[in-house]
Image (cartoon, rainbow, N blue to C red):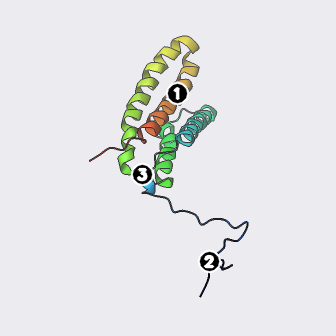
Amino acid sequence: MPDDRDPIDEPVPGAEPEPVPPTGDPRAEPAPFGLVVLLTVGSAVAVMVLAALLSHPPGLTFLLFGPIALVVFEVVAYDVWWRRWWGAVPGAVAGLAVYFEGRTALADVVGDTWAHPVAYVTAWTLFAVVFALCSRYPRTV
């Protein structure tokens, strides 16, 4: 019969405590803000650099592929719950508004050559920020 001072029951010095399993559903976690924004901005910049290096202007599919593929990857990789995707809609509306209005306004300031890339990257940045912020507030059914 073991007593209170049984050496088997004592913790081993330097041993790691057992990890506590996470509580809740991991899909309930919001999208990682900094990572989503930085990767989306980086993708938009990369698309603009590639577009500048091409001999003919790229089509709309090419311009949308990089950042959209990245956001889809983030949703799949981090298993963001479908109730948190609703932020893509206001993010897209805000991004499109900034792109079209900003491109026109920037054309007067910096010229047509720089207006498109600056407005493009700014619009995708705004999209990513709105999407990541909205993912913190899941929609209820």
Q: Residue furthest top?
A: 108
Amino acid bearing label 3: Ala
Type of amino acid at the residue the image marks with label 2: Asp
- Residue beneath label 1, please? 122
Where is 18 relative to 6, above or below? above
Residue tagged 3: 28
Figure check: 125 above or below 16: above
Quadrant of the rendered image containing residue 96: top left
Locate residue 131 relative to residue 47 in the image: left or right: left
Number of the front mark, 1 or 3: 3
Which residue lies under the disc numbered 2?
4
- Dot 1: few (<14), some (14–19), or many (≥20) neighbours within 10 Å? many
Calculate the distance from the C-alpha at mark 1 to the C-alpha at mark 3: 28 Å
Q: Most extreme residue toward the right, as rendered?
A: 14
Tell whether label 3 touches label 1 (CB within 8 Å): no
Residue type beneath disc 1? Thr
Q: Nearer the viewer, mark 1 or mark 2?
A: 2
Question: Is residue 75 shown above or below 98?
Answer: below
Which residue corresponds to the image point at 66% horizontal and 77% vertical from the top-left? Answer: 5
State which tag comes first along the sequence, 1 or 3.
3
